[in-house]
Amino acid sequence: MQKQTTKAPAVDARKIEDGLVIDHLSHSSLEVLATCPRQFVLHEFRLAEELPPAPIAETGSLIHEKIAEWIKVRFIDKTDEKAELNIDIPKTTLKKIQSTLKRELKGVESSKIWVEIELRDENLPIPFVAKPDLVYVKDEVLAIIDHKTGGYSDEISEKEKRQLERYLPVVYSMMKELIGDVKMAVLKIHRTNKGMLTLGTYTLGDIRKLRENLVQELLEAKFQTIPQVAHHPKPVVSPACFYCPYAISCLKTAISSGDLPRVFVVSKAISDRLREYFKNQEEPIVLDNIWMGTVSSEKRKVAKSAIEEFISLIASGKVSVDEAAKIVGISPSKAENLAKYLDKDIDEIIQYYTTSDFVITSGQKE
């Protein structure tokens, strides 16, 4: 039986752009646009298949929803001021989330707390939609907080910084009547596995400057041309590549130039589809090694060392999973997952339990 192959439809790049109007932009769409303009078009106008979200994304969304519900009940509506947060995650993480948010919202008036808001600012070159997780005002300070599930970094990434700094001028402009007079603003990342991280404080002058920056970004996006080229500035592979007529040449150019692309998804099912897709082309590319995790050999060494120590401690029978996690310095949730796979090969464990990015480390023509 002849093997069936799945090929990207023959899409004329010029036709993709004909008559398409950008209704609005958001932080995520600006990030995709900066990564690959063609990927942006395929996603923005839903010309690519809607793929199911990775499990990690579904879990993150559920945690966000539960936190918002809990804040409403306990701090905004105050229907149950002793309500406990109820999420099916490790108890240590659950307690950390509760204690962090209790400290954060202590003494804040219920009328000055907002969750699950969606703001659409029409007074920009392209309407911009911001969806901050938590906004509140206390002592004439406007606070904007974004929850991030997973991750243990003590640093706020450049991408997270861009998100908050894009949100701030929109929140300040759209909610001015609700928030009242404020002297300054503070931006924070709530890393649910770690705690609250403060990006910094911003004066009203800083907010005006951030709005000018956002206007400039949106103007550039408004007049963005979608290149019909093989190699993009920041090559990234995503499910949209299934539908891009330039995917093969883009990936080949990136690999041959040594500028290896980063896979944009965290689902193993999607990564398997990507591998199969690129193998089935007329000019196949073999993605020999897609790692879920480490973006550098040094980080991989650190991860391997920690996991080996954890396995050794559990195997000794002298400590519990939680105790081993504390000794090694890994999270309770990661420890629980690791404990289920102690019979696996160490390299296989590392592949699935380091960080959440895939990295294409090699590739060649078949």
Image (spheres, rainbow, N blue to C red):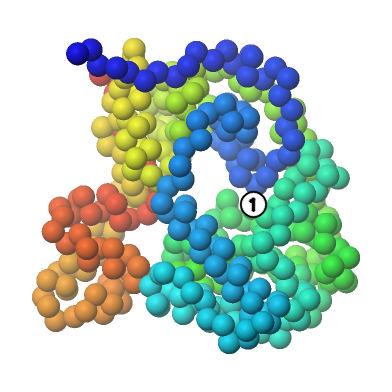
Q: Residue furthest left?
A: 316
Residue 355 at what x, y percent from top left? 37, 54
Which residue appears at 77% of the width and 59% of the height? Answer: 171
The residue tagged with tag 1: helix, strand or loop?
Answer: helix
Q: Nearer the viewer, residue 161 or 331?
A: 331
Residue 225 at what x, y percent from top left? 68, 23
Task: Point out the image quarter for the N terminus.
Answer: top left
| Residue annotated with mark 1 | 162
Taking 166 as reference, is 44 left or right? left
Q: Quadrant of residue 249?
A: top left
Which residue appears at 83% of the width and 44% of the height? Answer: 122
Task: Point out the image quarter for the C terminus.
Answer: top left
Residue 3 at what x, y percent from top left? 25, 16
Q: Is residue 229 above or below residue 273?
A: above
The mark total stands at 1
Q: Quadrant of residue 124?
A: top right
Which residue appears at 40% of the width and 18% of the height? Answer: 7
Taking 125 as reference, is 358 left or right? left
Camera sees residue 73 = yes
Using a 10 Å C-alpha cutoff, classify the residue at mark 1 as few (fewer than 14 neighbours), some (14 to 19) or many (20 or more): few
Residue 256 at what x, y percent from top left? 37, 23
Q: Is residue 305 above or below residue 129?
A: below
Camera sees residue 256 = no
